[in-house]
Image (cartoon, rainbow, N blue to C red):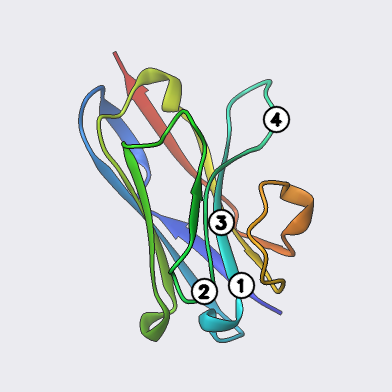
């Protein structure tokens, strides 16, 4: 089993930066493909970004390209999401997810483990 815990969310003003962290335990992080998803009220859970096991490949949602950066530190079992130039439309619960498969995938069903989520609220 893999346990994931997100941190770093909060209430911020538009234009600022925020960094989310996801601490993983139960299995070496290097064996997992990792992703960040978000879900706004009344909307589906969508991929924000995903990163390969060794960090050399990433995928981003079009809406966050150029503003968000995903990274990982396998030695510290932690995945990060650096968010800059935040917009009110980025407001959502952000979830960390892990998959034992190696292919990067946007589909939430591809991921086996999920954290409880952290709220990010961006005010205008």
38 w.r.t. 112: above or below? above
Residue that appears at 61% across and 85% down: 27
Q: Could you tell me how far apart the alpha carbons at marks 3 and 1 are, in whole angstroms?
A: 14 Å
Residue that appears at 70% across and 30% down: 44
Q: Earlier in the sequence, mark 3 or mark 1?
A: 1
Q: Residues within 10 Å of mark 1 (few under 14, many from 20)?
A: some
Number of marks in the image? Answer: 4
Disc 4, disc 3: CB below 8 Å?
A: no
Q: Could you tell me how far apart the alpha carbons at marks 4 and 1 are, in whole angstroms?
A: 23 Å
Quarter of the figure with residue 34:
bottom right
Q: Residues within 10 Å of mark 3 (few under 14, many from 20)?
A: many
Q: Could you tell me how far apart the alpha carbons at marks 4 and 3 are, in whole angstroms?
A: 16 Å
Quarter that holds the C terminus: top left
Residue beneath label 1, please?
3
- Judged from the image, the secondary structure of the residue bearing numbered disc 4 is loop
Residue beneath label 4, please?
44
Q: Earlier in the sequence, mark 3 or mark 2?
A: 2
18 w.r.t. 115: above or below? above
Disc 3, disc 1: CB below 8 Å?
A: no
- Judged from the image, the secondary structure of the residue bearing numbered disc 1 is strand
Residue beneath label 3, please?
35
Q: Could you tell me how far apart the alpha carbons at marks 4 and 2 are, in whole angstroms?
A: 24 Å
Nearer the observer, 76 or 32? 32
Residue beneath label 2, please?
24
110 left or right, relative to 3: right
């Amino acid at each position: 089993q893999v346990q994931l815990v997100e941190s770093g969310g909060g209430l911020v003003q538009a234009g600022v930066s925020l960094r989310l962290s996801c601490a993983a335990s139960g299995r070496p992080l290097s064996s997992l493909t990792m992703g960040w998803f978000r879900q706004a009220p009344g909307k589906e859970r969508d991929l924000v970004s995903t990163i390969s096991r060794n960090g050399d490949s990433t995928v981003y949602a079009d809406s966050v390209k150029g503003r968000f950066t995903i990274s990982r530190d396998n030695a510290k079992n932690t995945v990060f999401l650096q968010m800059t130039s935040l917009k009110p439309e980025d407001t959502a619960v952000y979830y960390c997810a892990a998959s034992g498969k190696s292919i990067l995938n946007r589909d939430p069903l591809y991921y086996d483990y999920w954290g409880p989520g952290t709220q990010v609220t961006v005010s205008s």
